[in-house]
Image (tube, rainbow, N blue to C red):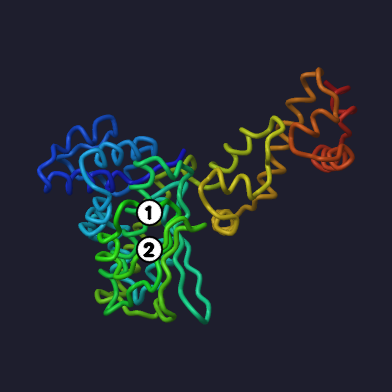
Amino acid sequence: MHTVSGVVPFLVAHVARTLDADPEPLLRGSGVDANTPPRGDAHIAVERYFEVWRRAMALFDHGFPLRVASAFRHEDNEIFGFLAMSCANIGEAFDRTLHYSRLYTVGATYEMDVDRDATRISWLPWPGALDDVGYRAAMDYHMANMEQAIRQLGHSPPRPVEVRLRHAAPPGATEYLSFYGTTPRFGCPRYELVYPVGLREVGVTTFNSRLRDYFDLECRKMIEKLGAANTVTAQVRKTLIGVMDGGDSGIEAIAKRLGMSTRSLQRRLAEEQTSYNDLLAEVREEFAKRYLARGTLTASEVAYLIGFTEPPAFFKAFKRWTGLTPREFQERG
């Protein structure tokens, strides 16, 4: 299930209140109380989150998500935010908070790539329609939120030299220029902030190694409390189960369904001491046994349903899993 911290819709409602709008209707059905800041690790489903943005955008112009991002403070995310504030530099803050990003979002994440020409931060969002006003507003917020976070953390950090947004340009772009210091490029393949080389080395003004280690430990405890249901392993397994009917079980397709890149998915699974191929084999074995036990499908049909393009490859894999051929498995009941 794709989720986001309830802190974000609460912030949307807070900024709406400062603009003389009633925050209660915006949050109706979201599970977030307009008068009580939620815990940083209390999440809501992204479908409800997008609806909060749709209601807000019915009241405000396209610059509203940028105003919400401007109101963001790391303290809003409690321990997750305090961890970033205690790190030595932007690179460490990014890496450490990325490791615990499930405290902030499930199903969407950021990536940082550095080469000799630039530092690029990509936002890999949840699936959604680019012409959905709520989805588009949420994307604008999360891009601007990263820039705002860097401004707050860094000691004189550089501004982005380029901002790339996937959705179409709204009427006028003065709010974007004012916020970023540059006019974004719209209709791009990815959501991306491009900074000069050296962003990672920019020092954090509130660096404190003892607090960093303390908040790192607290974040680790919070991740454990979230339980196995929120792990990437559990999400991949659930998604694979959903395609064991002839659907696409390739890692690229599954990563896209989960709103992350293939590389991010592989890294997150490695952090949880597993791999995509291991999970795929487990789910395929489970469903192969289930389908064969019915006795109404041929082994070739089962091979197709669980994602094998050639039956011989399935026969070989099944023998490796069980020590039996599909026919021997059926004969043993």
Task: Quickly name the residue at label 2.
Answer: 184
In the picture, the disc for residue 298 is: none
Residue at point 32% right, 59% down? 144
Sort mark 2 into few (<14), some (14-19) or many (20+) by Cα contacts within 10 Å.
some
In the image, is 190 to the left or to the right of 155? right
- Residue 150: where, in percent of width, then height? 32, 69
Q: Amino acid at mark 2?
A: Pro
Q: Is residue 117 left or right of residue 16?
A: right
**On screen, 174 above or below 321?**
below
As drawn, is 96 to the left or to the right of 283? left
* Quadrant position of residue 73: bottom left
**Viewport quadrant of the C terminus:** top right
Around disc 1, counting alpha carbons within 10 Å, would you say few (fewer than 14), some (14 to 19), or many (20 or more)?
A: few
* Residue linked to disc 1: 169
> Residue at point 89% right, 34% down?
325
Q: Quadrant of residue 27?
A: top left
- The correct choice, above or below, for 325 with respect to 166 in the image is above
**Kind of element beneath mark 2:** loop
Query: x and y percent of residue 173 in the render?
Result: 30, 59
Disc 1 is placed on an element classified as: loop
Label 2 – label 1 distance at C-alpha: 9 Å
Circles 2 and 1: CB atoms closer than 8 Å:
yes
Look at the picture and state if 260 lies above or below 55.
below
Check the image and name the residue furthest to the front.
Answer: 171
Whole-percent x and y of residue 91?
41, 73
The amino acid type, in three-letter code, at marker 1 is: Ala
**Direction from residue 288 to residue 24 in the image, left or right:** left
The foreground one among 176 and 226 is: 176
Q: Earlier in the sequence, mark 2 or mark 1?
A: 1
The image position of residue 216, as x and y in percent, is: 37, 63
